[in-house]
Image: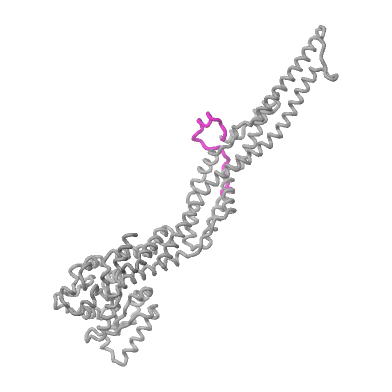
Amino acid sequence: MTAIVEGAKKLVGKGSPDVAPRVDGLQQAVESGRGRLDDRLLDDAAGVVERAGARLRLSGDHTVVALAGSTGSGKSSTFNALTGLDLAAVGVRRPTTSWTLACAWGTEGAGELLDWLGVPRRHQISREGLLEGARDAGDLEGLVLLDLPDHDSTEVSHHVEVDRLVKLADLLVWVMDPQKYADAAVHERYLRPLATHKDIMLVVLNHIDEIPPPRRAAMVADLERLLVQDGLAGVHVIATSARDGTGVPELKRAISEHVAAKKAAKARLLADITAIAARMKQANGDAKPGDIARARKGELVDAFADAAGVPVVVEAVRGATRRRAAQATGWPVTSWLSKLRPDPLRRLHLDLGSRGKELTAGSRASMPETTHVQWARVDTAVRSVADDVSVELTQPWAVAVRRASVSRLEDLNDALDRAITGTELGAARTPFWWRVVRFWQWVLVLVAVVGGLWLLGLAVMGYLRLPEPPTPDYRGFPVPTLLLLGGVLLGVLLALLSKFCAGVSAARRARAVDHRLRAAIDEVTERLVVEPVQAEVDAYRRVRTGLAAALK
């Protein structure tokens, strides 16, 4: 930006630094629009940026004026009349190739400018070098006058040369013949496309001496009418005759005013920037992109969670918690039966213990295969997000947003699997109350065993007809019987109560796991869908901001 700013100051003075920000804005729009807008349009815009940057770095004391016209329009004679030089007299012949002839008033900095214009040294003339001390040299000081090849020449190279220099000249002077000024070729190929450049354009109706004086005004008016149809209303039309000098002083004065003001180069750059920026704005649009609503993002997370098998994992956590609670808090006599049922989490390879993780570190979770219905739900959710964002955008940006939304979905399976396996399920944690209940269950088992052994001993002694020791009782119930029945009944009741509490605990743990898994899935949706879509939105906004700066 600094080099462009310095070039702008050199070209248009410190009081008019507005060219550089507009070039910079157009460049930002081109860079951000790559891969989204039409490449040909962006190439044209990049060409304008390149030309503007180059022109800003070159001489700001010279104004490049190009004389363009058809065969026989009198460009060369007008060129001779403006320069005051008889080219044949000084040994310079009009080139028969596609090269342009140039004459410069003031040589400092002109050479570098002419090299940029691509005019060979042998076709360059220094006005001051040939006519030292000419009176009118000061009026055109800083002028670089170009005599272009005929735009209607049969030589293709001539067309190429004209098209190239028409894009580079600061001021365009179209020299027309009274017999050809209505020719559609010049109007459709050059004048109409340059309707945005009318401030840096002059039109010369040459050979006016061949037209009877009463008809001249009508012919000029007719040419002005055609220019209005081309979108060039207000362009100065000058009737001239290079043969007798009619209108040449007026043409020279018009050119000298542009040269003295030193605004033609700036006006040309601004016209180029405005024209291409307007084309880009039409293709880009100026609508505000939509936002990804919280509800829409929730739908996206739900779809991804369903595809990842989050409901299966949550239910496995619930089942595993109940199973492990039954083993820890159930009646020890029967709780071992729960070990015969497979552990839901281990079946999914989600809780294998530390040694199991070492053995299966590189494996995936054994989740059920994602169904077509689940994939369709994911696709619908992703498409809805893209549609919400691009509903007001132009077609190129809508396509870009849609493409970005699915650009990373090929990594979806791996990302979802890592989200599931990387989330702490908390299944290995044993609540403190499980250990308390387990302690009391074994106490009750021990009590029941003591009571049972006591009764067994009494039965054996009775069977052997041995004298029985006195059996204590409590309110008429033998203590051994109370120990056996109490231990069993209390153990079973404690197991039933623990089962209810374990169900509540399993539901709470399942909800916590569901929350953590969905948080992990949310990160996946953010990385794989939201961030790429947001990147396109940011690029769109940079293009819009850049074009706003370019058109300011």
Image check: 307 left or right of 165? Answer: right
Say above or below: 119 vs 525.
below
Image check: 225 left or right of 530? Answer: left
| Residue toward you, 364 or 137 | 137
Point 56% across, 31% down: residue: 352
The quarter holding residue 550 reads bottom left
Instruction: Report the residue that reaches farthest toward the right.
Output: 476
Residue 144 in picture, x, y percent from top left: 24, 72
Point 62% across, 37% down: residue: 317
Q: Magenta residues, as a range?
A: 350-376
- Quarter occupied by the N terminus: bottom left
| Residue toward you, 365 or 136 | 136
Say above or below: 533 vs 365.
below
Instruction: Report the residue that reaches farthest toward the front.
Output: 15
Image check: 515 left or right of 503? Answer: left
Residue 365 in picture, x, y percent from top left: 54, 37
Q: Residue 372 colored magenta?
A: yes
Say above or below: 383 vs 272.
above
Question: What colour scheme does the image use?
Answer: one colour
Residue 412 in picture, x, y percent from top left: 51, 46
The quarter holding residue 251 reads bottom left
Image check: 535 left or right of 260? Answer: right
| Residue toward you, 377 or 7 | 7
Residue 287 in picture, x, y percent from top left: 50, 64
- Quarter occupied by the C terminus: bottom left
Q: Residue 40 colored magenta?
A: no
The quarter holding residue 430 reads top right
Count of numbered circles in the view: 0
